[in-house]
Image: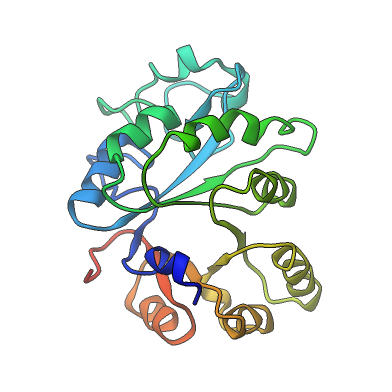
Amino acid sequence: MQPTLSWLTSRPIAHRGLHDDRLPENSIAAARAAADHGFAVECDVHLSSDRVPMVFHDDTLDRLTEMSGPLGDRPSSELVKLALAGTGERIPTVADFLRAIDGRVPVVMELKGTSPDADADFLQRLGPLLDGYDGDLALMSFDHWLIDQALAYGKRPVGLTAEGTEAEALARHREIFDQGCGFVSYCVDHLPNEFTDYVRDRAAPLITWTVRNPAQVTITKTHADQMTFEGFLPQN
């Protein structure tokens, strides 16, 4: 394992923060709860219509807010006022989210893309916020064009988020990984496979998503280095 990335696997990673019925996913409250328990925090990032990085998972607002339609169609000034899952928590900006964590625990940030053209300025918008953050933080994505931008940015570790067991998919994952990724986050139900074995053979950290039961914990302990979990409290 790369020494500079030992912090990435040193503790379980709370998927979208330590959320439950009271604390909505990707909220500042869920992030603080994870940090209070000593867990790393995984979060998701989209850009608003005015190109402000926002912490939110879905492409659309329908599931977690009273509004509907794509998050990317609305400005940040509107998004920060939207209640999450009917609670007092609001959709946070990345700036506010990182300010709340304040380097207490590592952050694993998944970049959520739309298309290469629509996302052309993603790291241009996100990078300055990361430059000013004094804490362990890694970037990852399913989207190859965002991985390319993150690698070009060059100031934070970059990982590939992936899934699948088909030979064609595994070959594509390897092609992207070999461009310079430092770690991989892989679907726990698709381990082990030739690609994840390839990653581990190169001593690159392999983390799993999303672990929700004891069987998936066992898979992670056998075939990976750390888990991204939700719905229970693992031993730290």
Question: Dividing the picture into quarters, in which one does residue 46 lie?
Answer: top right
Question: Image quadrant for the C terminus?
Answer: bottom left
Q: Position of residue 177 (x, y in %)?
A: 69, 66
- Horizontally, residue 234 falls left or right of residue 53, namely left
Indicate whether 9 appears above or below 214.
above
Question: Dividing the picture into quarters, in which one does residue 219 lie?
Answer: bottom left
Question: Which residue is nearer to you in this view: 1 or 29?
Answer: 1
- Horizontally, residue 95 falls left or right of residue 29, namely right
Q: Position of residue 8 (x, y in %)?
A: 41, 63
Indicate whether 133 appears above or below 125.
below
Q: Residue furthest left?
A: 36
Question: Which residue is nearer to you in this view: 136 or 171?
Answer: 136
Q: Residue furthest top?
A: 77
- The structure residue drawn at horizontal position 30% and vertical position 59%, both measured from the top left corner, is 231
- The structure residue drawn at horizontal position 47% and vertical position 13%, both measured from the top left corner, is 78
Question: Which residue is nearer to you in this view: 135 or 31?
Answer: 135
Question: Dividing the picture into quarters, in which one does residue 21 lie?
Answer: top left
Q: Position of residue 217 (x, y in %)?
A: 36, 77
Indicate whether 167 appears above or below 117.
below
- The answer to whether residue 55 shows anywhere in this view is no
- The structure residue drawn at horizontal position 30% and vertical position 43%, both measured from the top left corner, is 31
